[in-house]
Amino acid sequence: MRQLHLALPALIALLATHPALAQAPAPAGSEAGGGASWLWIILVLAVIAAAAWYFLSRRRSATSRTTGISHDRAAGSAEQAKGSIKEGIGSLTGDTKLQAEGRADKVEGKVQNTVGGIKDTLRGQ
């Protein structure tokens, strides 16, 4: 993937500086002097877009690896919330099976959250 990031801007720059593009004949029926200017505008915009994509994607991937909490911690917290809701609804309706499912979901969420915390600690976050 990294090689693609390096090759794409180089390929676009090579195409933009190719001598055949600079000597492109004007299309029939066009005004004199404006033959290939539209082509150069498109190529310059493509180079700018490729450079922006390259640098912005590098910055985003570098920061997303080091910030935030792990997926396990987020999923564990969601599982705990789901378990609390199930347990509360079970206690309101008197459904002991739903209460037991809620308690089991809460325990499962706590375990998953703990695993995520251990992973974060090992990664140094």
Image (tube, rainbow, N blue to C red):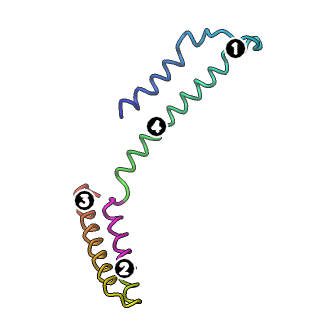
Residue at (29%, 82%) from the top-left corner? 100
Tell me, yes or no, whether the highlighted magenta stretch contains residue 73: yes
Circle 1 sits in a helix, a strand or a loop, which is it? loop
**Residue 112 in the image, given as x and y percentages of width and height:** 27, 67
- Residue where numbered disc 2 is placed: 84
Look at label 2 and name its amino acid: Ser
Residue at (62%, 20%) from the top-left corner? 40
- Residue where numbered disc 1 is placed: 35
Q: Nearer the viewer, mark 1 or mark 2?
A: 2
Distance, label 1 to label 2, CA atoms, is 70 Å
Circle 3 sits in a helix, a strand or a loop, which is it? helix
Distance, label 3 to label 1, CA atoms, is 60 Å
**Residue 38 in the image, given as x and y percentages of width and height:** 67, 21
Stretch of the chain drawn in magenta: 69-85
Disc 1 + disc 4, Cβ < 8 Å? no
- Residue where numbered disc 4 is placed: 55
**Comes first in the chain, label 3 or label 1:** 1
Image check: 27 left or right of 105?
right
Point out which mark residue 119 bears: 3
Among the 4 quarters of the image, the one containing residue 46: top right
Quadrant showing the N terminus: top left
**Comes first in the chain, label 4 or label 3:** 4
Look at label 4 and name its amino acid: Phe
Crowding near the residue tagged with mark 4, few <14, some 14–19, many ≥20 C-alpha atoms within 10 Å? few
Q: Nearer the viewer, mark 3 or mark 2?
A: 2
Look at label 3 and name its amino acid: Lys
Image check: 78 left or right of 114?
right
**Residue 105 in the image, given as x and y percentages of width and height:** 30, 74
